[in-house]
Every structure is written in C-alpha cells, then in structure tokens.
Amino acid sequence: MARILLIDDDSTVRYALKQVLERAGHQVEEATDGQIGLQMYASGRQDVVVTDIIMPNKEGIETIIELRRMAPDLRIIAMSGGGRTGNRDFLAMAEKLGAARIIAKPFRPRELVEAVDTVLKAA
C-alpha cells in the first residue's frame, strides 16, 4: 500500500480516481490544485503524487518543478487531457521536468493503477 496525493481541480475526476486507487489498496489524499497539493505534500510526505496539468491557482508543471525541489526522488505521475486547447505537449514537458510517468486523459482505471505500480517498483 502506498500513500498517494491526488491533485486535480475536477471533483468528479478526483472522486473516480480515488475510488480506483483505494480499491487497489492505496491510501489517497486529495488536493484541488497545485498550491494546496504542495502544502499537503510538505506536511504529509506521500509516496506518490498524481497530478493533473491544467488547473487554476498553481498548474501541474509548476507543481512538478516545486515538488522536485522539495523531494528529488519523489515518484510523480502527470495526467492531462490538454485542457481547453487539447494540447498534450504539456505531458511531454511534465516528463522532461521530472514526472516518472505520464497518462493522457481519458484513460482506463487499470492504466493509472499500472502507472502507480510501476513507479513504486522503480524505487
């Protein structure tokens, strides 16, 4: 079981992904944007962070950069559907900046569980 911080501004997405991850045996905490996610990580030190890219207040790319400064070995999974633009280049950027895995939305629940399993095994 891993402690996972799930950062996404869409409450429906967060709810669904939390259910998937908890069914896979993980403990999940939720944040509505990168700013809150960074605060939660600083106080909780989760094993894995799963973050959306397009969010208000503090978007995912900036969140990944700051998480890397805080914890260079943290396992980060970035996910995005490209937002209103549909641009998935953000995922490639997230990977270059330190995301261990990237997932394009929409994805199957199994893909997220596999991504978490993969980053946990790589530690």
Image (spheres, rainbow, N blue to C red):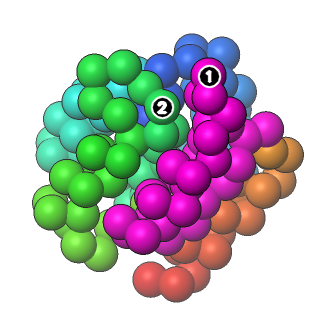
Task: Classify residue 97 as left or right of residue 77.
Answer: left
- Return the x and y of residue 121 as percentages of the image width and height: 57, 81
Q: Secondary structure at mark 2?
A: loop
- Residue that label 2 marks: 54
Locate residue 105: give its quadrant. top right
Spatial CA distance of label 2 from label 1 is 9 Å
Where does residue 94 sit, x and y in percent of width and height? 45, 58
Q: Nearer the viewer, residue 64 or 47?
A: 64
Residue 82 lies in magenta, yes or no? yes
The residue at the point 85 percent across, 46 percent down is 108
What amino acid type should be assigned to the residue bearing mark 2? Ile
For residue 84, the mark is 1
Mark 2 Cα shell of 10 Å, populated few (<14), some (14-19), many (≥20): many
Residue at x-position 68% and y-position 34%: 86
Q: Residues within 10 Å of mark 1 (few under 14, many from 20)?
A: few
**What's the residue at 18%, 35% (across, down)?**
39
Q: Nearer the viewer, mark 2 or mark 1?
A: 1
Magenta residues span: 78-106
